[in-house]
Image (spheres, rainbow, N blue to C red):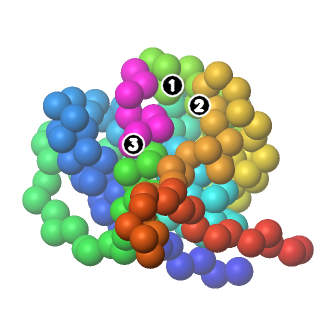
Amino acid sequence: MKQKPVLYSVYDVAFRLIDHALNDNEYLQPQKLHRVLYLAQGYFGAAYHGAMLMPAVFIAEEAGPIEPNLYVLMEETRPDVRLKAINEKTSHFIESIWRQFGHHSVDHLNASIRNHAPYHDAWQAGPGTVISFDEMVTFYTSVRKTATTPEADGVVRPRVMRSHKGKPVATTDWRPRRIK
């Protein structure tokens, strides 16, 4: 099955996460950026029936997963990249990922992800092994909430909208079960 990612590039997510960190008066360390991007890709696939958030490949390195193209491009500084517009649902998802994982330290994220099967299996195969997107989706779809890993349904926060009477109402996207 051919997949069309929702976003055009990994940079569309990375720079938005960096901007969220700056808005929170926080410096987003490169390792933390890569871990949050990895989680965003996995949880998006889990939340939206295997849909791919961004055309990104993650590889297993000792500290944790990295997206090698972003890693090489941002070794020295943040490049000047023109971001494409994204829809409100995707923007809300990226913000939810930041709110869920952005407050964690790099060490916490590294320790958590090292115990996740997709990363662990790729690392066991050797440094630089590509982490399978399908395995990420399967893992994050089936994961049950633990102290370090939330369920996919718990990652995307409800949006607050107004009812016809002007009262705030929490809403989430309708995601029917996928029948196999």
Q: Nearer the viewer, residue 175 or 109?
A: 175
**Mark in the foreground, 3 or 1:** 3
Query: Which amino acid lies under the numbered mark 3 shown in the image of this protein?
Result: Trp
N-term mark: 2 or 3: 3
Q: Is residue 103 left or right of residue 123?
A: left
- The magenta stretch spans which residues? 98-105
Gap between marks 2 and 3, in whole Å?
16 Å
Label pair 2/3, CB-CB below 8 angstroms: no
Location of residue 179 (image quadrant): bottom right
**Mark in the foreground, 2 or 3:** 3
Tell me the residue at 13%/54% (across/down).
Answer: 79
Image quadrant occupied by the N terminus: bottom right
Q: Dot 2: what SS?
A: helix
Label pair 1/2, CB-CB below 8 angstroms: yes
- Neighbourhood count class around disc 2 (C-alpha, 10 Å): few under 14, some 14–19, many 20 upward: many
Tell me, yes or no, if residue 144 can be seen here: yes
The circle drawn on residue 110 is 1
The circle drawn on residue 113 is 2
